Amino acid sequence: PELLDGTTGLVVGVANKRSIAWAIAQRLDAAGARLALTYQNERTEGDVRKLADTLSNCAAVLPLDVQDDAQVASAVAGAADALGGLHTLVHAVAFARAEDLGGRFVDTGREGFHTALDVSAYSLAALAREAEPHMRAGGGGSIMTLSYIAADRAVPGYNVMGVAKAALEAIVRYLAWDLGDAGIRVNAISAGPVRTLAARGIPGFGSMADQAA
């Protein structure tokens, strides 16, 4: 039998075929999990629905702006209802304004800082809070998010996103403490440079990827 037969998962953050979230969704699907996907807005909805149609068993495609608490609650509840429960949550969401990437971190404005931390870090806590009752009801689960080495080291050009990733990793530790008694695992995956569309917004990313290779 496949490793994840009989399990369900919500994957947040698929935007296009180059998204790391999409690669994760494909692997979960291949391992037998039934999935629900989210899309951020009307601009990405069409692409996400086309990708969902290629999965073996995608039960729902739901709207989700992670800065909207009502949509966070609705998306998690909708996924759990469509799937008949929720075992896995994949958080693959991050955003910083273009003007806050590159240049100097010290020049980051308050609004840009708030946006990056809200979307890239707090959203994990918000989603976990909504997912917790469904995972507790099912006897446990797994929550995973995506980090980067810039959470530990200063990476020129990554700037406020590195600070957001550091906050994200701290949130992972606190969530693991809060939810571990229910058998809910919380982990961060730290990938090397991956040539996604989002990565194009990081100054010098091409040379970073070449050096890593």
Image (cartoon, grey):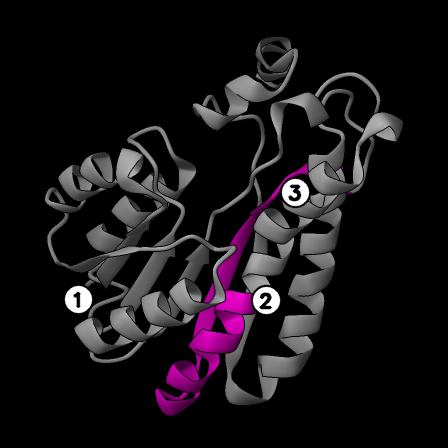
Rounded to the nearest angstrom, the CA distance separating label 1 from label 3 is 41 Å
* Disc 1 and disc 3 in contact, CB within 8 angstroms: no
- Toward the front, the furthest residue is 111
Q: Is residue 149 magenta?
A: yes
Q: Residue at x 11, y 52 (%)?
A: 56
Q: Is residue 113 left or right of residue 196?
A: right
Packing grade of label 2 (10 A; few <14, some 14-19, many >=20) is some
Q: Secondary structure at mark 3?
A: helix
Name the residue carrying label 1: 1
Q: Earlier in the sequence, mark 2 or mark 3?
A: 3
Q: Residue at x 84, y 21 (%)?
A: 104
Q: Which residues are magenta?
A: 126-151
Which amino acid does the dot numbered 1 rest on? Answer: Pro
Q: Secondary structure at mark 2?
A: helix
Name the residue carrying label 2: 125
Name the residue carrying label 3: 116
Which amino acid does the dot numbered 3 rest on? Answer: Ala
Q: Earlier in the sequence, mark 1 or mark 2?
A: 1
* Disc 2 and disc 3 in contact, CB within 8 angstroms: no
Q: Quadrant of the N terminus?
A: bottom left
Closer to the camera, 47 or 196? 47
Q: Is residue 164 above or below residue 79?
A: above
Residue 57: quadrant of the picture: bottom left
Which amino acid does the dot numbered 2 rest on? Answer: Ala
Rendered location of residue 42, percent (x, y): 27, 40
* Disc 1 and disc 2 in contact, CB within 8 angstroms: no
